[in-house]
Amino acid sequence: MTQFELSREHEEFRRTVRDFADATIRPHVAEWDKAHHFPTDVVQKMGDLGLFGLTSPEEYGGAGLDAEDGPFTSLCLAIEELGRVDQSIGITLEAGVGLGINPILTYGTEEQKQAWLPDLVAGQRLAGFGLTEPGAGSDAGATKTKAETDAASGEWVINGSKQFITNSGSAITSLVTVTARTGVSDSGKPEISTIVVPSGTPGFTAEAAYDKLGWHISDTHPLTFVDCRVPEGNLLGERGRGYAQFLATLDDGRVAIAALAVGLLQACVDVCVEYSLDRQTMGGPIGRKQGVAFQIADLEVMLHASRLLTYRAAAMKDAMLGGGGPSVKEFKQAASVAKLYSSESAVTATRIATQVFGGYGFMEEYPVARFYRDAKILEIGEGTSEVQRMLIARGLGLPVE
């Protein structure tokens, strides 16, 4: 093989998701974006297509794909194709699987899996991951939310707040998993644990949705916990391992965000080529002008590089699922490289695309305006560009702080 290639099955799957996105999502995106509308019915149709179950076993309603089938690569392909049409829909799937399903699937007890996964895997319900706080984002060790045990009732009592939490307050959200301080470790550092909080639990409030710069279709809320009580059995995984759990969760998420960025890059190339052939000036299409054509050529280079970095990292993850392949350290490095390059390329691409469209690019009736608004968060979510550079440098053995 002279180049990295997807399998025939992966290419067929890509076409299936692309056809779904073009037929079911594309005609309505501008309307939904303007109204900040979260299309619950479309999310559930994505579930009917099996998109939320790509990385889950059959016993919970998932696809039951073996590692050699590339389940994580399939998920990234789905995110890319949805993100090509709309970034909000793409992040809904990414967060629904990576931040909603995967923590329960990876760390939950069998009882927890049976209770929550079937509806989540079917795409009939969503789950959020409550990590970020007003004073704890990249520095997750600064978490202030606390959970204390009440021995008399056998419950956790949670107090605190979270912010920027995706899929946390929709009509079909069933739970959020929340990181909280549950004590102090032997080293004197805060003990961070993860606890499942069902929607509708007294004391848990998903506050009004944010008025965001972009991702208008995505469901995003701040969360408040005031003497919120859940059973002690809602602890997810081992007590005190919440910090390690979220780090592992974010590694996968960085590759998925890179796939979302690839979808946006592809969208920029598509619309710029079409527009530069149609838009006439000075007796011909603007695409014959080197100043325009060379910019679009640069977009194509960024697209190919981003796609290869992303699917290399996804293939590494699939190999690890099979018990072989790279080390965790190698995968972490590949995930950060893919996320950093792809997200920054996507931001650059939307700026170029807006420039190609000229004054029209500044008008909301053209999709590049939405692309421009949606892109910036890619450099922030699932670890900022600064964090990625720090992790990459550390992976090279540099003692960066």
Image: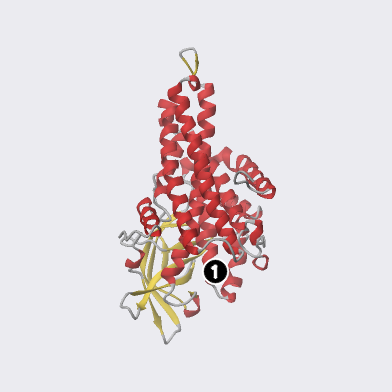
Dot 1: element? helix
Quarter of the view holding residue 158: bottom left
Question: What sort of colour scheme is used for the picture?
Answer: secondary structure
**Residue under the image location 53 percent in, 43 percent down:** 263
**Residue under the image location 60 percent in, 46 percent down:** 4
**Residue under the image location 66 percent in, 52 percent down:** 49
Task: Choose between 230 and 303: the one closer to the eye.
Answer: 303
Residue 351: x %, y % from top left: 40, 35
Residue 55: x %, y % from top left: 60, 60
Please give the count of numbered marks on the rendered protein: 1
Quarter of the view holding residue 123: bottom right
- Res. 38 in view: no
Q: Residues within 10 Å of mark 1 (few under 14, many from 20)?
A: some
- Res. 79 in view: yes
Name, please, the residue furthest toward the top: 283
Quarter of the picture holding the C terminus: bottom left
Q: Is residue 73 left or right of residue 134?
A: right
The residue pinned by badge 1 equals 106
Q: Amino acid at mark 1?
A: Thr
**Residue under the image location 40 percent in, 59 percent down:** 395
Q: Is residue 331 above or below residue 304?
A: below
Residue 299: x %, y % from top left: 48, 35
Q: Is residue 120 above or below residue 210?
A: below
Task: Choose between 213 and 255: the one closer to the eye.
Answer: 255
Q: Is residue 187 above or below residue 73?
A: below
Name, please, the residue furthest toward the bottom: 152
Q: Is residue 285 left or right of residue 189?
A: right
Residue 281: x %, y % from top left: 46, 16
